[in-house]
Amino acid sequence: MMFILKKPLSWILLYLIFHILIRLLFSTTMQVDDTEQIRHGQDLLLGYPIPQPPLYSWLSWGMFKIFSTGLYALTLLKYALIALTFWFTWLVSGQLFQHLQTRYIATFSYLLLPSFAWHMHQGFTHTILLGFGIILTMHALLSLKENNSIKNYLYFGLALGIGLMAKYSFLLFMIPLLASAASITSFRKIIINQKILLTIGVFVLIIGPHTYWLTQHYQEIFISIDQKLKVTSDNLLLDRIKSAGQFAVAAIIFVMPFALIFIINSWKRLFNTDKQVITDDLTLLLNRFYLIIIVSVLTLTLFVSMPHFKVRWFHPLMMIFPLWMLARIERKELLSKSIMRWFAGITIIFTILIFSIRIAQVTIGPELGIYGRLNSPVIETLNKLPDHLIKNSAIKTQDEFLGAHLLSIYQDNDITINGIFYQNSVTHDNNRCLLLWDDDESFLDPDESFLEPNATQNIDSGELTTMIADTK
């Protein structure tokens, strides 16, 4: 055991295991993104009525077939993808950097990016797969430069396909990356090559079926995306400049406190005042990637206001920023021990703080009467429902959050969620219909008339009250 702990990468494994245990042992209530996957993962479809590609839902479907529908399967999927993201970051850092020290910093940098250190444990699904697709694509491109074999061309197409099928915003990473690669002679030789048709072929095979579905449903998807981003062109130049400033601030926040540590301690290296920066085509690739992004943002500012980007949406643009910073900072000489102590100390403090908040969220929170999605006792309340009431009952709810929990625990019942029928087993002889709803919402039947049930039994669990009603 002590031998394992002496290896820095083993700490990543322990870090992930601890997060898994916090998620599974302290709360059985799912987050909103997880409940979405519970519902969509019941069937394999070319697309789903959400503004995201279907790959994560396909993976969820596969996990449900192996481990049964529920939080356990989704947690295993999430942390398998996170572990792969850390591992491929380690591999990419080996392609980029000469020192083992720099590789460790690159791999552990995620622990100092709030979107990774906090948000990915709280609610991310598609974004986790997006992060894996981004680092996988970097590894595939750098592997292709090292060896332009047929296998690596196929691998590059696979990585691009996974990235785009993870999240549409992958395009914000893919386009600048390909443009920066095409501007460098050594990369251009492998891109403008007959073998690139293999890459394109694999890419098209992966995205083709969903692209066909998208042509039939593009309006509902793009309207949803437009409502999120709020891009407009009918405002003053000053407003556009202001929106670009807000965009830039959000991008900077995404990489804090990691970036701040090295700006303070290694600013001479970062800004190359010592004139010793290592220049090669790999560093040039990262430099031009961010140059293209900066030029694109400035150009867009002339014509439209920048999209309303939340900090946690910046993965396509800023996930590889630590790699760029470290490429600027690395020299033939190692970073000083004092800088490494700063990095290690802040990483440990930041990680312990997040562990503590996550545990308090699901333990102390309910004791203080502070409830949220994560600690609302949904499963505990449903488990108190009498067995005879559930048996041979069709269950109906208009609450999608509650409905996903029903799917996870009542897998032998026919369940209807917001008008959509989920049949988890063979057709049943249902003797009754059980109606469930949040106690702070009125329940509507399909013809939009209010039901006024006669509540015959109340079940209390924390702040949640379940009313069992006779609707005859």
Image (tube, grey):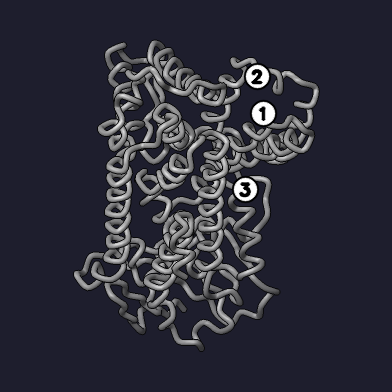
Element carrying mark 3: helix
Task: In the rendered structure, find residue 70 and report the number of the disc placed on it.
Answer: none
Q: Quadrant of residue 52?
A: top right
Q: CA distance from mark 2 to mark 3?
A: 33 Å
Eye-nearest disc, 3 or 1: 1
* Residue at 55 percent of width and 57 percent of height: 80
In the image, residue 378 lies at what x, y percent?
Answer: 39, 71
Residue 109 percent across, percent down from the top left: 40, 43
- In percent of the image, x 55 and y 49: which residue is there? 87
**Residue 457: horizontal and vertical position, in percent?**
35, 84
Mark 2 residue crowding within 10 angstroms, few (<14) / some (14–19) / many (20+): few
Q: Residue at x 28, y 50 (%)?
A: 345
Task: Name the residue carrying label 1.
Answer: 145
Q: Amino acid at mark 3?
A: Leu
**Mark 2 or mark 3, which is nearer to you?**
2
Are the residues tagged 1 and 2 within 8 Å (C-beta)? yes
Which residue is labeled 2 in the image? Answer: 186
Name the residue tied to disc 3.
55
Left or right of 31 in this view: 95:
right
Rate crowding at label 1 as few (under 14), some (14 to 19) or many (20 or more) other CA atoms within 10 Å.
Answer: some
Q: In this view, which residue lies farthest toward the front?
A: 333
Q: Amino acid at mark 2?
A: Ser
Q: Quadrant of residue 157?
A: top right
Report, in whole angstroms, how far the alpha carbon at label 3 lies from the one at label 1: 28 Å
Mark 1: secondary structure: helix
Q: Earlier in the sequence, mark 3 or mark 1?
A: 3
The numbered mark, 1 or 2, whose residue comes first in the sequence reads 1
Which residue is at a point 67% across and 73% down the rendered structure image?
A: 425
How far apart are the two marked residues, 1 and 2, measured between alpha carbons?
A: 8 Å
